[in-house]
Image (tube, helix red, strand yellow):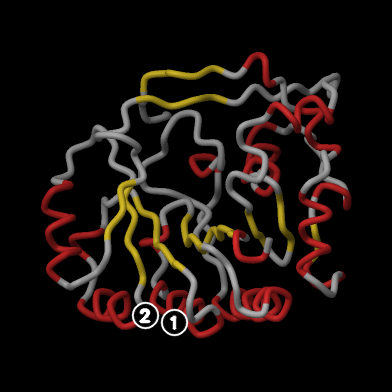
Amino acid sequence: TVYDFHFEFHIVEHCNLKCAGCTHFSPLADEEFLDPLEFEKDINKLAELTKGNARFINLLGGEPLLHPQICDFARICRSYFPNTLIRIVTNGIKLLDMTEEFWKCCKENSIVIGITQYPINIDYEECIEKIKLYGIDYESFSGEGYPRDEMWRLSLDKSAANRPVENFISCPRANACIFISHGKIYNCATMANINHYNKCFGTNFVLCEEDYVDIYKISSAQEIFDKLCKPKPFCRFCNIERRKYGIKWRKTA
């Protein structure tokens, strides 16, 4: 229902950590920052479709704290979704260096700061203390305990020989993180960001109109739900049986 609807935005495509196996392909992405004006246009349309209701909105990347206008995104998001849980999800690398304006903005707009803690040289306890010092809510995105020292890896199949329906039904990521990019809604971040993979490796994992929902071609939230619940042609590129879990976390070259 609309009250369980949630979505995520990349406000930055690139990242300052470069985790191996990143399913958003951020280590492969060129430096790219989302325009706040485009973001506001999309948020406005989503608020119109959902009447300003959503369970949560995550602002992430890439690494969202790299965006010099991050406060604009927080303010815009809150203005259109006054009662929604809004998070900035970060790896924490830049957190202790953020300006007073950032902390004030998060407090005034009731922004939750979520941290994914990795086994890197960061004092995450100090980060958490600073968040709480400003009276801002904090969440860990590392699961039980931290740091997150394991990853999982996709298996993309250029042969496109996999069955989309079976893949969609068995995929643990389908609609787990509903992703919005440039006015289009995707069932997962992999589809939304496959352009970075294609550009880096010269592959041709193609998207078609049936793979996403164009928010400017629909008139109700129900149309979003009707489209999201169906298997997508792109699912034929995923070999779910060959996905690897429990891989030791590391940075990519």
Element at badge 1?
Answer: helix
Q: Which amino acid does label 1 sit on?
A: Arg
Determine whether, in the image, residue 231 is placed left or right of residue 150.
right
User: Which residue was labeled with disc 2?
Assistant: 109
> Which residue does the image show at 49% across and 81% down from the upper left?
82
Task: Write down the quadrant of residue 120 in the picture.
Answer: top left
21 is higher (above) or lower (below) than 37: above
Give x and y (percent) for residue 234.
Answer: 80, 37
Closest to the camera, between mark 1 and mark 2, is: 2
82 is higher (above) or lower (below) than 118: below
Mark 1 is surrounded, within 10 Å at the Cα level, by few (under 14), some (14 to 19) or many (20 or more) other residues, namely some
Task: Write down the quadrant of residue 98 in the picture.
Answer: bottom left
Mark 2 is surrounded, within 10 Å at the Cα level, by few (under 14), some (14 to 19) or many (20 or more) other residues, namely some
Task: Write down the quadrant of residue 50 in the picture.
Answer: bottom right
Quarter that holds the N terminus: bottom right
Looking at the image, tell me whether mark 1 or mark 2 is earlier in sequence order: 1
Determine contact: label 1, label 2, CB under 8 Å. yes
> Which residue does the image show at 44% across and 82% down from the upper left?
75
**Viewer-nearest residue: 221 or 163:** 221
- Count the numbered circles shown: 2
Give x and y (percent) for residue 211.
Answer: 82, 47
Element at badge 2?
Answer: loop
Quarter that holds the C terminus: top left
User: Which residue was labeled with disc 1?
Assistant: 75
Give x and y (percent) for residue 201.
Answer: 66, 31
> Which residue does the image show at 41% across and 72% down from the upper left?
70
Q: Which mark is residue 135?
A: none
**Viewer-nearest residue: 125 or 198:** 125
Alpha-carbon span between mark 1 and mark 2: 6 Å
Q: What residue type is labelled 2?
A: Asn
Determine whether, in the image, residue 58 is placed left or right of residue 241.
left
